[in-house]
Image (tube, rainbow, N blue to C red):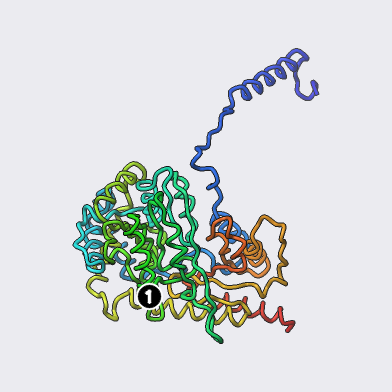
Amino acid sequence: MLRRSGLSPGQYFLRRKNRARFSWYLNKTKMSRPVQARRLEGVDKNIWVEFVKLAATYPNVNLGQGFPDFSPPDFVKEAFVKAVSGENIMLHQYTRAFGHPALVTNLARFFGKLLGQELDPMTNVLVTVGAYEALFCCFQALVDEGDEVIIIEPFFDCYEPMVKMAGGTPVFVQLRSKAAEAGKLMSSGNWKLDPAELASRFTKQTKAIVLNSPNNPLGKVFTREEMELIADLCVKHDVLCFSDEVYEWMVYDGKEHIRIASLPGMWDRTITIGSAGKTFSTTGWKVGWTLGPDRLLKHLRTVHQNSVYHCPTAAQEAVAQAFQREFDNYGKQDSYFVQLAQELQQKRDWLVRSLVAAGMKPIVPEGTYFLMADISEFKSEVPDLPDSDEPYDSRFIKWMIINKGLVAIPVSAFYSTPHKRNFDHLIRFCFVKEEATLKAAEDILQQWSLEKTGQ
Protein backbone atom coordinates (compact mmCIF):
# COMPACT_ATOMS: atom_id res chain seq x y z
CA MET A 1 0.00 0.00 0.00
CA LEU A 2 2.81 2.45 0.95
CA ARG A 3 4.76 1.63 -2.22
CA ARG A 4 1.71 2.16 -4.44
CA SER A 5 0.86 5.49 -2.79
CA GLY A 6 4.45 6.78 -2.86
CA LEU A 7 4.12 8.01 0.75
CA SER A 8 6.49 7.54 3.64
CA PRO A 9 5.05 5.76 6.73
CA GLY A 10 4.80 9.10 8.54
CA GLN A 11 2.94 10.79 5.68
CA TYR A 12 0.61 7.83 5.26
CA PHE A 13 -0.48 7.70 8.92
CA LEU A 14 -0.80 11.53 9.07
CA ARG A 15 -3.17 11.47 6.11
CA ARG A 16 -5.28 8.75 7.72
CA LYS A 17 -5.43 10.76 10.93
CA ASN A 18 -6.56 13.88 9.09
CA ARG A 19 -9.26 11.93 7.27
CA ALA A 20 -10.54 10.54 10.56
CA ARG A 21 -10.64 14.07 12.02
CA PHE A 22 -12.55 15.37 8.97
CA SER A 23 -15.04 12.51 9.19
CA TRP A 24 -15.56 13.26 12.90
CA TYR A 25 -16.06 16.95 12.05
CA LEU A 26 -18.68 16.16 9.41
CA ASN A 27 -20.62 13.94 11.79
CA LYS A 28 -20.39 16.53 14.54
CA THR A 29 -21.64 19.38 12.34
CA LYS A 30 -24.41 17.39 10.66
CA MET A 31 -27.90 18.61 11.63
CA SER A 32 -29.65 16.21 13.96
CA ARG A 33 -32.85 18.14 14.65
CA PRO A 34 -35.97 17.38 12.52
CA VAL A 35 -36.14 19.65 9.47
CA GLN A 36 -39.59 18.80 8.09
CA ALA A 37 -42.43 21.12 9.09
CA ARG A 38 -45.21 19.28 10.93
CA ARG A 39 -47.76 20.41 8.37
CA LEU A 40 -46.06 18.12 5.80
CA GLU A 41 -46.49 14.96 7.86
CA GLY A 42 -48.52 12.37 5.99
CA VAL A 43 -48.88 14.40 2.80
CA ASP A 44 -45.57 13.59 1.10
CA LYS A 45 -46.83 10.80 -1.19
CA ASN A 46 -48.41 11.71 -4.52
CA ILE A 47 -50.09 9.28 -6.91
CA TRP A 48 -49.13 11.33 -9.97
CA VAL A 49 -45.41 11.28 -9.25
CA GLU A 50 -45.41 7.48 -8.96
CA PHE A 51 -47.53 6.64 -12.01
CA VAL A 52 -46.13 9.33 -14.30
CA LYS A 53 -42.65 7.91 -13.62
CA LEU A 54 -43.85 4.37 -14.32
CA ALA A 55 -45.58 5.46 -17.54
CA ALA A 56 -42.34 7.08 -18.70
CA THR A 57 -40.41 3.86 -18.10
CA TYR A 58 -42.40 1.50 -20.34
CA PRO A 59 -43.79 1.87 -23.89
CA ASN A 60 -47.50 2.50 -23.49
CA VAL A 61 -50.75 4.17 -24.51
CA ASN A 62 -51.33 6.76 -21.82
CA LEU A 63 -54.95 7.16 -20.74
CA GLY A 64 -53.86 8.05 -17.22
CA GLN A 65 -53.03 11.69 -16.66
CA GLY A 66 -55.74 14.22 -17.52
CA PHE A 67 -54.39 16.20 -20.43
CA PRO A 68 -55.24 16.26 -24.15
CA ASP A 69 -52.63 14.89 -26.56
CA PHE A 70 -54.06 17.00 -29.39
CA SER A 71 -53.53 20.65 -30.24
CA PRO A 72 -55.50 23.53 -28.71
CA PRO A 73 -57.85 25.33 -31.11
CA ASP A 74 -56.17 27.54 -33.70
CA PHE A 75 -57.63 30.79 -32.35
CA VAL A 76 -56.05 30.11 -28.94
CA LYS A 77 -52.62 29.33 -30.41
CA GLU A 78 -52.80 32.38 -32.64
CA ALA A 79 -53.60 34.57 -29.64
CA PHE A 80 -50.52 33.26 -27.84
CA VAL A 81 -48.26 33.72 -30.87
CA LYS A 82 -49.53 37.28 -31.25
CA ALA A 83 -48.89 37.95 -27.56
CA VAL A 84 -45.25 36.84 -27.70
CA SER A 85 -44.36 38.10 -31.17
CA GLY A 86 -46.41 41.29 -31.43
CA GLU A 87 -45.38 44.88 -30.90
CA ASN A 88 -46.57 45.14 -27.29
CA ILE A 89 -43.25 44.56 -25.54
CA MET A 90 -44.88 44.89 -22.11
CA LEU A 91 -46.47 41.46 -22.59
CA HIS A 92 -42.98 40.08 -21.86
CA GLN A 93 -42.86 41.84 -18.48
CA TYR A 94 -44.72 41.72 -15.17
CA THR A 95 -48.39 42.57 -15.30
CA ARG A 96 -50.84 43.26 -12.49
CA ALA A 97 -50.16 40.76 -9.68
CA PHE A 98 -53.79 39.75 -9.18
CA GLY A 99 -54.55 39.31 -12.86
CA HIS A 100 -53.69 40.83 -16.23
CA PRO A 101 -56.19 43.70 -16.80
CA ALA A 102 -57.44 42.33 -20.13
CA LEU A 103 -58.05 38.88 -18.63
CA VAL A 104 -59.82 39.91 -15.43
CA THR A 105 -62.01 42.29 -17.46
CA ASN A 106 -63.09 39.54 -19.84
CA LEU A 107 -63.56 36.99 -17.05
CA ALA A 108 -65.74 39.45 -15.10
CA ARG A 109 -67.86 40.20 -18.14
CA PHE A 110 -68.19 36.58 -19.27
CA PHE A 111 -68.93 34.95 -15.90
CA GLY A 112 -70.89 37.87 -14.52
CA LYS A 113 -73.49 37.10 -17.16
CA LEU A 114 -73.56 33.40 -16.21
CA LEU A 115 -73.70 34.04 -12.47
CA GLY A 116 -76.23 36.85 -12.64
CA GLN A 117 -73.78 39.16 -10.86
CA GLU A 118 -72.14 42.48 -11.71
CA LEU A 119 -68.51 41.47 -11.23
CA ASP A 120 -65.79 44.02 -10.52
CA PRO A 121 -62.67 42.85 -12.42
CA MET A 122 -60.37 44.27 -9.74
CA THR A 123 -62.06 42.81 -6.65
CA ASN A 124 -64.19 39.84 -7.74
CA VAL A 125 -61.59 38.06 -9.91
CA LEU A 126 -58.15 36.67 -8.99
CA VAL A 127 -55.91 35.01 -11.59
CA THR A 128 -53.79 32.13 -10.30
CA VAL A 129 -51.17 29.68 -11.55
CA GLY A 130 -53.75 27.14 -12.61
CA ALA A 131 -56.71 25.94 -10.58
CA TYR A 132 -54.23 24.16 -8.30
CA GLU A 133 -52.96 27.45 -6.89
CA ALA A 134 -56.52 28.72 -6.64
CA LEU A 135 -57.38 25.76 -4.40
CA PHE A 136 -54.21 26.25 -2.35
CA CYS A 137 -55.08 29.92 -1.78
CA CYS A 138 -58.60 28.97 -0.65
CA PHE A 139 -57.38 26.58 2.02
CA GLN A 140 -54.48 28.73 3.19
CA ALA A 141 -56.54 31.90 3.35
CA LEU A 142 -59.78 30.63 4.85
CA VAL A 143 -59.14 27.39 6.79
CA ASP A 144 -57.62 27.52 10.24
CA GLU A 145 -56.53 25.00 12.85
CA GLY A 146 -59.54 23.16 14.21
CA ASP A 147 -61.74 23.96 11.21
CA GLU A 148 -63.53 21.08 9.52
CA VAL A 149 -63.82 20.90 5.73
CA ILE A 150 -66.35 18.55 4.11
CA ILE A 151 -65.00 16.65 1.09
CA ILE A 152 -67.30 14.62 -1.16
CA GLU A 153 -65.85 11.22 -2.14
CA PRO A 154 -64.49 10.41 -4.66
CA PHE A 155 -62.46 13.63 -4.73
CA PHE A 156 -59.51 15.10 -6.60
CA ASP A 157 -56.60 13.92 -4.51
CA CYS A 158 -55.09 17.33 -3.59
CA TYR A 159 -58.10 18.41 -1.50
CA GLU A 160 -57.24 16.28 1.54
CA PRO A 161 -53.54 17.23 1.88
CA MET A 162 -54.31 20.91 1.26
CA VAL A 163 -56.85 20.89 4.10
CA LYS A 164 -54.34 19.22 6.40
CA MET A 165 -51.51 21.60 5.47
CA ALA A 166 -53.77 24.50 6.45
CA GLY A 167 -54.35 22.89 9.86
CA GLY A 168 -57.91 21.82 9.08
CA THR A 169 -59.62 18.46 9.48
CA PRO A 170 -61.11 16.78 6.40
CA VAL A 171 -64.55 15.25 6.93
CA PHE A 172 -65.71 12.84 4.23
CA VAL A 173 -69.11 12.03 2.79
CA GLN A 174 -69.55 9.52 -0.02
CA LEU A 175 -71.47 9.55 -3.25
CA ARG A 176 -73.25 6.19 -3.10
CA SER A 177 -74.01 4.19 -6.22
CA LYS A 178 -77.41 2.81 -7.10
CA ALA A 179 -77.93 -0.08 -9.49
CA ALA A 180 -78.36 0.76 -13.16
CA GLU A 181 -81.55 -0.14 -15.00
CA ALA A 182 -81.62 -3.65 -16.44
CA GLY A 183 -79.64 -3.88 -19.65
CA LYS A 184 -78.02 -0.47 -19.25
CA LEU A 185 -74.54 0.58 -18.22
CA MET A 186 -74.15 2.39 -14.94
CA SER A 187 -73.97 6.17 -15.26
CA SER A 188 -72.21 8.68 -13.03
CA GLY A 189 -75.75 9.97 -12.40
CA ASN A 190 -76.43 6.74 -10.47
CA TRP A 191 -74.07 8.00 -7.78
CA LYS A 192 -75.84 10.28 -5.30
CA LEU A 193 -75.45 11.93 -1.93
CA ASP A 194 -77.63 10.71 0.91
CA PRO A 195 -79.28 13.91 2.22
CA ALA A 196 -79.33 12.78 5.84
CA GLU A 197 -75.73 11.60 5.72
CA LEU A 198 -74.60 14.89 4.17
CA ALA A 199 -76.52 16.92 6.76
CA SER A 200 -74.87 14.94 9.57
CA ARG A 201 -71.42 16.11 8.44
CA PHE A 202 -72.20 19.76 9.16
CA THR A 203 -71.18 20.76 12.69
CA LYS A 204 -70.22 23.91 14.58
CA GLN A 205 -66.63 23.31 13.44
CA THR A 206 -67.50 23.13 9.73
CA LYS A 207 -65.82 26.00 7.88
CA ALA A 208 -66.27 24.93 4.26
CA ILE A 209 -67.40 22.26 1.83
CA VAL A 210 -65.49 21.43 -1.35
CA LEU A 211 -67.74 20.89 -4.34
CA ASN A 212 -66.41 19.49 -7.62
CA SER A 213 -68.97 19.43 -10.41
CA PRO A 214 -68.44 17.94 -12.91
CA ASN A 215 -66.61 15.54 -10.63
CA ASN A 216 -63.14 14.10 -11.16
CA PRO A 217 -62.76 11.05 -11.28
CA LEU A 218 -66.41 9.98 -11.54
CA GLY A 219 -67.67 12.41 -14.17
CA LYS A 220 -70.82 13.16 -12.17
CA VAL A 221 -72.67 16.38 -12.96
CA PHE A 222 -74.60 17.42 -9.86
CA THR A 223 -78.27 18.16 -10.53
CA ARG A 224 -80.02 21.37 -9.54
CA GLU A 225 -81.78 19.47 -6.75
CA GLU A 226 -78.46 18.24 -5.36
CA MET A 227 -76.95 21.72 -5.63
CA GLU A 228 -79.91 23.21 -3.78
CA LEU A 229 -79.50 20.64 -0.99
CA ILE A 230 -75.84 21.62 -0.56
CA ALA A 231 -76.67 25.34 -0.79
CA ASP A 232 -79.41 25.10 1.85
CA LEU A 233 -77.04 23.37 4.28
CA CYS A 234 -74.31 25.96 3.64
CA VAL A 235 -76.72 28.81 4.36
CA LYS A 236 -78.20 27.06 7.40
CA HIS A 237 -74.80 26.42 8.98
CA ASP A 238 -73.06 29.58 7.67
CA VAL A 239 -70.47 27.53 5.75
CA LEU A 240 -68.24 28.50 2.82
CA CYS A 241 -68.22 26.63 -0.48
CA PHE A 242 -65.09 26.09 -2.59
CA SER A 243 -66.58 25.20 -5.96
CA ASP A 244 -64.07 23.53 -8.30
CA GLU A 245 -65.64 23.94 -11.75
CA VAL A 246 -62.67 23.34 -14.04
CA TYR A 247 -64.68 20.90 -16.20
CA GLU A 248 -67.67 23.23 -16.56
CA TRP A 249 -67.67 23.10 -20.40
CA MET A 250 -67.28 19.31 -20.58
CA VAL A 251 -70.90 18.26 -19.97
CA TYR A 252 -72.59 15.59 -22.11
CA ASP A 253 -75.94 14.06 -23.02
CA GLY A 254 -77.77 17.36 -22.65
CA LYS A 255 -76.94 17.70 -18.95
CA GLU A 256 -76.74 21.18 -17.45
CA HIS A 257 -73.86 22.57 -15.42
CA ILE A 258 -75.28 24.45 -12.42
CA ARG A 259 -73.06 27.12 -10.88
CA ILE A 260 -73.74 26.96 -7.16
CA ALA A 261 -72.76 30.60 -6.70
CA SER A 262 -75.84 31.52 -8.75
CA LEU A 263 -78.24 29.94 -6.24
CA PRO A 264 -79.97 32.04 -3.55
CA GLY A 265 -77.71 32.90 -0.62
CA MET A 266 -74.59 31.39 -2.19
CA TRP A 267 -72.73 34.22 -3.97
CA ASP A 268 -71.58 35.74 -0.69
CA ARG A 269 -70.12 32.44 0.58
CA THR A 270 -68.78 30.78 -2.59
CA ILE A 271 -65.41 30.86 -4.33
CA THR A 272 -65.72 29.56 -7.88
CA ILE A 273 -62.57 28.08 -9.42
CA GLY A 274 -61.87 27.82 -13.15
CA SER A 275 -59.06 26.72 -15.45
CA ALA A 276 -57.91 27.85 -18.89
CA GLY A 277 -55.94 24.59 -19.12
CA LYS A 278 -59.14 22.54 -19.11
CA THR A 279 -61.29 25.17 -20.86
CA PHE A 280 -59.01 25.66 -23.88
CA SER A 281 -56.96 22.42 -23.83
CA THR A 282 -53.81 24.24 -22.69
CA THR A 283 -52.91 22.52 -19.42
CA GLY A 284 -49.26 23.55 -19.70
CA TRP A 285 -50.08 27.26 -19.63
CA LYS A 286 -51.18 27.05 -15.98
CA VAL A 287 -53.70 29.88 -16.01
CA GLY A 288 -56.55 29.59 -13.51
CA TRP A 289 -58.85 31.95 -11.64
CA THR A 290 -61.19 32.41 -8.73
CA LEU A 291 -64.44 34.36 -8.73
CA GLY A 292 -66.18 35.55 -5.59
CA PRO A 293 -67.05 38.42 -3.25
CA ASP A 294 -64.25 40.78 -2.29
CA ARG A 295 -64.68 39.93 1.41
CA LEU A 296 -63.36 36.42 0.57
CA LEU A 297 -61.02 37.12 -2.34
CA LYS A 298 -59.07 39.78 -0.44
CA HIS A 299 -57.72 37.01 1.80
CA LEU A 300 -56.78 34.86 -1.20
CA ARG A 301 -54.94 37.86 -2.63
CA THR A 302 -52.88 38.02 0.57
CA VAL A 303 -51.77 34.40 0.12
CA HIS A 304 -51.13 34.91 -3.58
CA GLN A 305 -49.02 38.06 -3.13
CA ASN A 306 -46.89 36.36 -0.50
CA SER A 307 -46.24 33.18 -2.45
CA VAL A 308 -46.61 33.09 -6.24
CA TYR A 309 -47.32 36.82 -6.63
CA HIS A 310 -47.55 36.83 -10.42
CA CYS A 311 -48.72 34.66 -13.34
CA PRO A 312 -47.19 34.61 -16.86
CA THR A 313 -48.32 37.70 -18.75
CA ALA A 314 -48.36 36.38 -22.33
CA ALA A 315 -50.47 33.34 -21.42
CA GLN A 316 -52.95 35.59 -19.61
CA GLU A 317 -53.20 37.86 -22.66
CA ALA A 318 -53.88 34.87 -24.92
CA VAL A 319 -56.59 33.53 -22.60
CA ALA A 320 -58.14 37.01 -22.45
CA GLN A 321 -58.44 37.08 -26.24
CA ALA A 322 -59.87 33.55 -26.27
CA PHE A 323 -62.61 34.57 -23.84
CA GLN A 324 -63.35 37.64 -25.92
CA ARG A 325 -64.02 35.36 -28.89
CA GLU A 326 -66.20 33.04 -26.82
CA PHE A 327 -68.17 35.96 -25.39
CA ASP A 328 -69.04 37.03 -28.93
CA ASN A 329 -70.00 33.45 -29.93
CA TYR A 330 -71.61 32.29 -26.69
CA GLY A 331 -74.60 30.03 -27.26
CA LYS A 332 -73.97 29.83 -31.01
CA GLN A 333 -72.91 26.76 -32.95
CA ASP A 334 -69.60 28.51 -33.69
CA SER A 335 -68.80 28.55 -29.98
CA TYR A 336 -65.74 26.49 -29.13
CA PHE A 337 -67.42 25.43 -25.88
CA VAL A 338 -70.34 23.92 -27.81
CA GLN A 339 -68.04 22.13 -30.26
CA LEU A 340 -65.72 20.88 -27.50
CA ALA A 341 -68.50 19.08 -25.62
CA GLN A 342 -69.75 17.46 -28.83
CA GLU A 343 -66.28 16.27 -29.79
CA LEU A 344 -65.44 14.91 -26.35
CA GLN A 345 -68.75 13.07 -26.04
CA GLN A 346 -67.81 11.14 -29.18
CA LYS A 347 -64.43 10.27 -27.67
CA ARG A 348 -66.13 9.16 -24.45
CA ASP A 349 -68.49 6.88 -26.38
CA TRP A 350 -65.58 5.37 -28.31
CA LEU A 351 -63.71 4.43 -25.15
CA VAL A 352 -66.89 3.11 -23.51
CA ARG A 353 -67.43 0.75 -26.47
CA SER A 354 -63.80 -0.39 -26.36
CA LEU A 355 -63.95 -1.18 -22.64
CA VAL A 356 -67.28 -3.01 -22.90
CA ALA A 357 -65.93 -5.14 -25.76
CA ALA A 358 -62.93 -6.07 -23.61
CA GLY A 359 -65.10 -7.15 -20.67
CA MET A 360 -64.68 -4.14 -18.40
CA LYS A 361 -67.71 -2.34 -16.99
CA PRO A 362 -67.40 1.41 -17.58
CA ILE A 363 -69.41 3.94 -15.58
CA VAL A 364 -70.59 6.35 -18.27
CA PRO A 365 -69.65 9.89 -17.20
CA GLU A 366 -71.96 12.88 -17.65
CA GLY A 367 -68.98 15.22 -17.77
CA THR A 368 -65.18 15.79 -17.42
CA TYR A 369 -62.21 14.15 -19.16
CA PHE A 370 -62.60 10.85 -17.33
CA LEU A 371 -64.50 7.64 -16.86
CA MET A 372 -64.21 4.93 -14.22
CA ALA A 373 -64.35 1.23 -15.07
CA ASP A 374 -64.95 -1.87 -12.96
CA ILE A 375 -62.13 -4.43 -13.34
CA SER A 376 -63.68 -7.16 -11.15
CA GLU A 377 -63.82 -9.55 -14.13
CA PHE A 378 -60.03 -9.31 -14.54
CA LYS A 379 -58.97 -10.57 -11.12
CA SER A 380 -57.79 -13.83 -12.65
CA GLU A 381 -55.11 -11.78 -14.43
CA VAL A 382 -53.78 -10.24 -11.22
CA PRO A 383 -54.88 -12.22 -8.15
CA ASP A 384 -55.82 -10.22 -5.08
CA LEU A 385 -53.47 -10.18 -2.08
CA PRO A 386 -55.64 -9.48 0.97
CA ASP A 387 -52.62 -8.89 3.22
CA SER A 388 -50.99 -6.35 0.87
CA ASP A 389 -50.84 -2.72 2.02
CA GLU A 390 -51.21 -1.60 -1.59
CA PRO A 391 -54.78 -1.33 -2.93
CA TYR A 392 -55.67 -3.83 -5.63
CA ASP A 393 -56.33 -1.23 -8.34
CA SER A 394 -52.85 0.22 -7.87
CA ARG A 395 -51.18 -3.18 -8.30
CA PHE A 396 -53.45 -4.00 -11.25
CA ILE A 397 -52.50 -0.83 -13.13
CA LYS A 398 -48.79 -1.35 -12.54
CA TRP A 399 -49.20 -4.85 -14.01
CA MET A 400 -51.26 -3.44 -16.89
CA ILE A 401 -48.64 -0.82 -17.75
CA ILE A 402 -45.81 -3.34 -17.77
CA ASN A 403 -47.64 -6.25 -19.43
CA LYS A 404 -50.26 -4.60 -21.64
CA GLY A 405 -48.82 -1.15 -22.29
CA LEU A 406 -51.96 0.69 -21.14
CA VAL A 407 -51.94 3.42 -18.49
CA ALA A 408 -54.79 4.32 -16.14
CA ILE A 409 -55.03 5.73 -12.59
CA PRO A 410 -56.29 3.81 -9.51
CA VAL A 411 -59.60 5.11 -8.20
CA SER A 412 -58.58 4.27 -4.63
CA ALA A 413 -56.30 7.33 -4.86
CA PHE A 414 -59.45 9.47 -4.88
CA TYR A 415 -60.72 8.14 -1.55
CA SER A 416 -59.70 8.65 2.08
CA THR A 417 -57.61 5.92 3.68
CA PRO A 418 -60.49 4.16 5.52
CA HIS A 419 -62.48 3.85 2.28
CA LYS A 420 -59.78 2.97 -0.29
CA ARG A 421 -60.32 -0.80 -0.10
CA ASN A 422 -64.03 -0.42 -0.85
CA PHE A 423 -63.30 1.07 -4.27
CA ASP A 424 -60.09 -0.66 -5.37
CA HIS A 425 -61.99 -2.61 -8.05
CA LEU A 426 -62.25 0.59 -10.11
CA ILE A 427 -59.73 2.37 -12.33
CA ARG A 428 -59.88 5.75 -14.10
CA PHE A 429 -59.25 6.37 -17.80
CA CYS A 430 -58.85 9.72 -19.58
CA PHE A 431 -60.62 9.78 -22.97
CA VAL A 432 -59.58 13.30 -24.02
CA LYS A 433 -57.07 11.97 -26.53
CA GLU A 434 -56.60 12.11 -30.28
CA GLU A 435 -58.16 9.41 -32.46
CA ALA A 436 -54.85 7.58 -32.95
CA THR A 437 -54.44 7.21 -29.19
CA LEU A 438 -57.98 5.92 -28.69
CA LYS A 439 -57.52 3.50 -31.60
CA ALA A 440 -54.27 2.20 -30.09
CA ALA A 441 -56.05 1.71 -26.74
CA GLU A 442 -58.89 -0.08 -28.53
CA ASP A 443 -56.40 -2.44 -30.20
CA ILE A 444 -54.74 -3.26 -26.88
CA LEU A 445 -58.10 -3.97 -25.25
CA GLN A 446 -59.24 -6.08 -28.20
CA GLN A 447 -56.09 -8.20 -28.13
CA TRP A 448 -56.39 -8.55 -24.37
CA SER A 449 -59.97 -9.77 -24.76
CA LEU A 450 -58.88 -12.39 -27.30
CA GLU A 451 -56.16 -13.63 -24.96
CA LYS A 452 -58.65 -13.92 -22.09
CA THR A 453 -61.03 -16.03 -24.17
CA GLY A 454 -58.20 -18.17 -25.53
CA GLN A 455 -58.72 -17.14 -29.15
State the quadrant of the C terminus. bottom right
Task: Confirm whether residue 315 shows in the render.
Answer: no
Q: Secondary structure at mark 1?
A: helix
Query: Residue 60 in the image: x percent, y percent?
Result: 60, 67
Q: Looking at the image, which is closer to me, 283 or 144? A: 144
Along the horizontal axis of the image, is 358 left or right of 293? Answer: right
Q: Amino acid at mark 1?
A: Leu
Q: Quadrant of residue 386?
A: bottom right
Tell me residue 53's x, y (percent): 58, 56
Question: In the drawing, does residue 335 fall left or right of residue 367?
Answer: left
Q: How far from the left and from the top, in percent, is residue 39?
A: 49, 41
Image location of residue 316, percent across then percent down: 30, 57
Image quadrant occupied by the N terminus: top right
Q: Is residue 406 above or below residue 298?
A: below
Q: Residues within 10 Å of mark 1 (few under 14, many from 20)?
A: some
Mark 1, residue position: 340
Residue at (47, 47) in percent of width and height: 164
Query: Which residue occupies the foreground of this view, 93 or 230?
Result: 230
Q: Quadrant of residue 228?
A: bottom left
Q: Residue at x 36, y 72 (%)?
A: 225
